[in-house]
Image (cartoon, coloured by chain):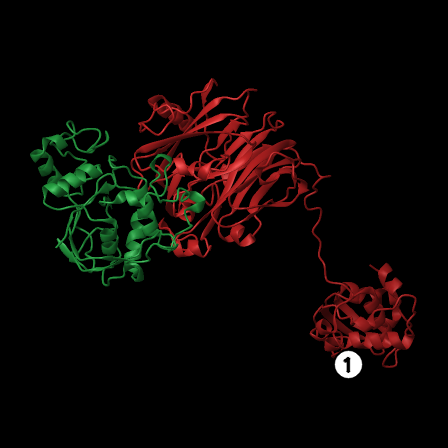
Chain colours: A green, B red
Amino acid sequence: MAYVPAGVYSPLFGGKNSPRQVGVPAFFLDVRPVTNAEFLGFVRANPNWRRSDVSPIFAESGYLGNWSGDLELGPRAQADSPVVQVSWFAARAYARWRGMRLPTTAEWERAASAGFMTENGSTEAAYREAVLKWLSVPAPLRLPPAGSGRPDVFGVRDLVDLVWEWVDDFNTARLADESGDAPGLDSNLVCGAAGAGVRDFTNYPAFLRSEFRSSLDATYAVPSLGFRCARSP
Amino acid sequence: MLLAAWACIGMAAMGGCSRASKTPDNSGNATTSKLPVEYALLLPAPSVPGSVERSHPSHVIVDLEVREVVRHLASGVDYTFWTFGGDVPGLFIRVREGDLVEIRLHNHPSSKLPHNIDLHAVIGPGGGAASTITAPGHTSTFSFTALHPGLFVYHCGTAPVPMHVANGMYGLIFVEPKGGLPPVDHEYYVMQGEVYTAGRFGEEGLQAFDPDKANDERPAYVVFNGSVDSITGDKALKAKVGQTVRIFFGNGGPNLTSSFHVIGEILDEVLGDGGSRVTERDVQTISVAPGSAAIVELKVPVPGTFVLVDHALSRAFGKGALGMLKVTGPEDSGIYSGKISDTEYGGTASETVAARSEARPGSILPVAAPEDIDQPGVVPTLEVRKERGRKTYLMACFACHQPDGRGLPGIFPPLAGSDFLKADKARAIKIPLMGLNGPVVVNGKPFNNIMPPQAFTDRQIADVLTYVMNSWGNDFGTVSPDEVKQAH
């Protein structure tokens, strides 16, 4: 794991009274996302998380859909590629099994704002290019191995250009949904109003991540969504 | 492109994998209604589904699949577009005023991003966007009643919206008015959009989105139907002489207003901003804002290739905003004659002083100055004419015949005291008009050289001949412009 020192996170959305910056205490973060091989170890030890046995309230029907069998990875799930099509419940269970947890949005975004050479990636052309390039190509049929990307200034790899990643409090990114109106969230934050209350219009990658998280439900198993673990010191 | 239609029907049969608990009756279906159910036929540009042939409302199911695909943008240039139905612009949706429209938005599992849909035909939060944010590998469903007729834009409303739209997520939904539209011979779907690539226009390879260019509203490409050559060459729109063409024209933007024009054509009728009434007739160019659309109709009475453009010309001729309508059939020279003739033109008698002073000896430039032009009703005196002729002589003739009219022995014949000149005025007039070559004898001496015709007006020739025939002791009479005219 890599040590991410204490820092700040600037939330993308916020009302007049919410803070412009949130302090993030130091924490440890996995250097790379969890792999298929590692998750296989988890389901071997925890049969209730196997594909045929998992409860539908914890994972939708596409859970581990790219694996060949309950305990068999197969050609579409290389051992050292990031595990995907895992629900939030499953990711949390894995983290707990390893004595860890999922990172929070603030922790994840704090880590992802770091560039390859400095703590502020938005000033580095190479960093911005890496993000936009990932968004410019469709998802490949087979994902490259986890941990093969260039390390950032903290030594963390693949944060922004391999797979989307679960965070513990993904639900707070929710912009709007009729049935999911959380109290205090302005249900107008869609389409035309998805601009009101925005602080940084030019931070496209952060926008995209925020929108992606807000489209999720805890049971979702999305082909481009994986996770990594965190732990407090 | 029936593939798209069959795909829609296939997906509808499968029913998708809808999440429960979001719909009124928990079944994944929209509000149960007593209306007959049908599945919309969705078609890619430039095709348009046929008019709605029923006189009652229906419950119309629209199966629209979002896919992120690499597509051709220009020759040698690819781009990852985010599409409604695999195409840019998105598939054309055609329903009838009063229909209950059920949108099933499927986001293909291979998509990287969530997407939603805002249809301008919807009255309701976000135009549907509030109810359709869809993660990859999921389907969202909502329904609306098409209360207003008209041609409306639909687009993705997921933040950052300019990026989703610029990446191709726009299309048109036509809510046909209850009485339908008058029949025409052809209906076409054309939609303009900008593409903000990191590379310059034409730079080859798979291009990435450039957020700075998008923020600054400086696209590298402005195109019709998703690529530079989508409706050109053998993919041009077609019609026959005498037919009427209707174009459903939309502008997805995200930022620029289109000045839509068809070169060589006039738009007979325009239903502006896609509304339900004719707003203009007989116009040349219409403004279509980003997020707006217009229905235009034009007759094509003569054959030819008529070029569709955004008349902000840097976009048409530098960024790709160009398409074609090819009309075949018999010509009508009364309406358009084509080129009747192509003749030489040497300029007029009203050349400027500057042009005259630039004339070189031996050149055949016309040499009149404004002060040389006859005022109407004024008959110039002999002195005036001789002076004008002298100026002309000193611009051209002197180079060979010399300022004193003596010529060069053996080479250029003299004019001073020339028996050749004196003997035949009609012949003399023809010389500056048509030139002279071959052997001549002047004052007993042989000459055999080439004199080119002089590009003077009749008046100039008359004046210079008058000067020559009354200078250096010559007293050979005068020459009038009419005499020169008759000598042509």
B318, B327: nearer the viewer: B318
Q: Residue at x 51, y 25 (%)?
A: B99
Residue type highlighted by circle 1: Pro
Q: Position of residue B349 (x, y in %)?
A: 78, 65
Residue A129 shows in the view: yes
The quarter of the picture where residue B267 lies is top right
Q: Is residue A75 left or right of residue B488?
A: left
The quarter of the picture where residue B345 lies is bottom right
The quarter of the picture where residue A224 lies is top left
Q: Position of residue A1 (x, y in %)?
A: 12, 53
Q: Residue at x 30, y 47 (%)?
A: A209
Q: Position of residue B269 (x, y in %)?
A: 65, 37
Q: Is residue B432 left or right of residue B119?
A: right
A23, A118: nearer the viewer: A23
Residue B199 shows in the view: no
Q: Is residue B421 left or right of residue A14?
A: right
* Image quarter of the C terminus of chain B: bottom right
* Image quarter of the N terminus of chain B: top left
Q: Mark 1 sits on what residue?
A: B403
Q: Position of residue B298 (x, y in %)?
A: 63, 36
Identify the element where label 1 is drawn: loop
